[in-house]
Image (spheres, grey):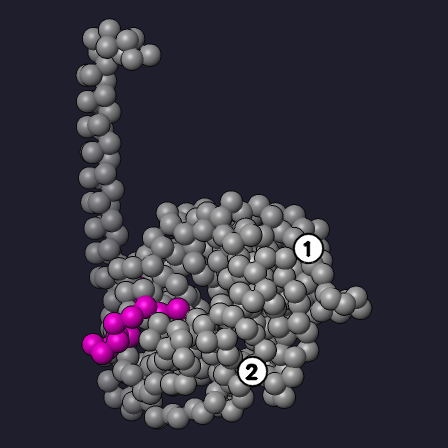
Amino acid sequence: KRKRKEKNPNYQKIMTDIAGRIAAARKDVEQLKDVISKARYACDDTSLEAATKDVAGAARITPKPKRILKGHFAKIYALHWSEDKKHLVSASQDGKLIVWNGFTTNKVHAIPLRSSWVMTCAYSPSGSLVACGGLDNICSVYNLKQRDAPIRAQRELAAHSGYLSCCRFLTDRQIVTSSGDMSCMLWDVETGTLVQRFDDHTGDVMSLAVPTASDKNVFISGGCDMAAKLWDIRAGRCIKSFSGHTADINSVNFFPNGNAFGTGSDDSSCRLYDIRAWKQLASYTDPSISCGITSIGFSASGRYLFAGYDDFNCHVWDTLKASLVTTLTGHDNRVSCLGVSGDGFALCTGSWDSFLKVWA
């Protein structure tokens, strides 16, 4: 092949022509991006800062750890509240998936996992199913109504070629997963079949979120390509992409009304994006905080943004004023996950120190 290329007198000319066309196409793309950006910014009639200048700052809150959930013996990587606002599930690298009663601290179920390298877990809307996954590249679904003990996987959803970073149920029949193979996938839980694959990220997908509102036709994802993306399940594609971060996005979460979402990144910032305006509304940073964010969540009203950091703390932000309200201390290692109960009365944080703390 090399000899044929060298003998072809037009080979170099053809390659130069292709390179020139590629460069011209890239230039056209950048010009189109500028035109789109200018058109979008021309429609901006105000900013969040200007719109809330007369709004008083959020009241200083002082949540206390009301419950400490003890039972894991290794790093906790994920937790998720049930929609009954009472139970939650946690996943640890001790090889256990534990379902807790958040009020009594009792363990309802302790599920042994086939792989201890778990990274995510999720509760189904009805509370009858839980799911998890990690470095085994598989999303395992467990039925909590099983009579057998120990509970075994009802379905093992296998199609990803990289680690499973996050999973979330849309309904008891459908679940969405994200992976280090740069894709998200929609599954039918009952049949165990892959329904749709979503490809647009150019780096590992680290997190995804589904809206708490009735609209289950969209979800958001964030990844190592520093982009957050909004997906439409009906269209089967990414419909909006949001930029601004300068490092990996580790966590995404919908704002309570479903019209905005937040992100947490290794660049030490959280950000709030408006879906309808297709723009960033606020950035939450502080000069004294220089570590990455692992997880985020909103209060029921949306006024407070909770973020777990690598500095062992959970920092609380005023969503409207982008100011630091308070800091929740008490863990002895990085806060790896957090979640707010559906009624907004409790915040649970999980840490590499092997403990879960319920704050109120």
Answer yes or no: is residue 210 visible: no
Of the pair 173 and 145, the residue shown nearer to us? 145
Q: Residue furthest right?
A: 147
What element does badge 1 sit on? Answer: strand
Compare residues 76 and 224 and report the one nearer the observer.
Answer: 76
Check if residue 286 falls in the magenta segment: yes
Q: Position of residue 256 (x, y in %)?
A: 46, 76
Q: Which mark is residue 202?
A: none
Horizontal and vertical percent for residue 209? 48, 64
Q: Closer to the camera: disc 2 or disc 1?
A: 2
The tally of labels here is 2
Q: Residue at x 65, y 53 (%)?
A: 156
Q: Residues within 10 Å of mark 1 (few under 14, many from 20)?
A: some
Figure check: 133 above or below 194: below
Q: Is residue 336 magenta?
A: no
Q: Which residues are magenta?
A: 279-294
* Residue 170 in which image quadrant: bottom right
For label 2, the residue is: 69
Query: Where is mark 1, residue-wise?
Result: 155
Q: Is residue 346 above or below residue 228?
A: below
Disc 2 is placed on an element classified as strand
Residues at marks 2 and 1 touching, judged by CB atoms closer than 8 Å: no
Q: Is residue 189 left or right of residue 61?
A: right
**Which residue is most to the front?**
73
Q: Note whether 299 is above or below 140 in the view shown.
A: below
Q: Amino acid at mark 2?
A: Leu
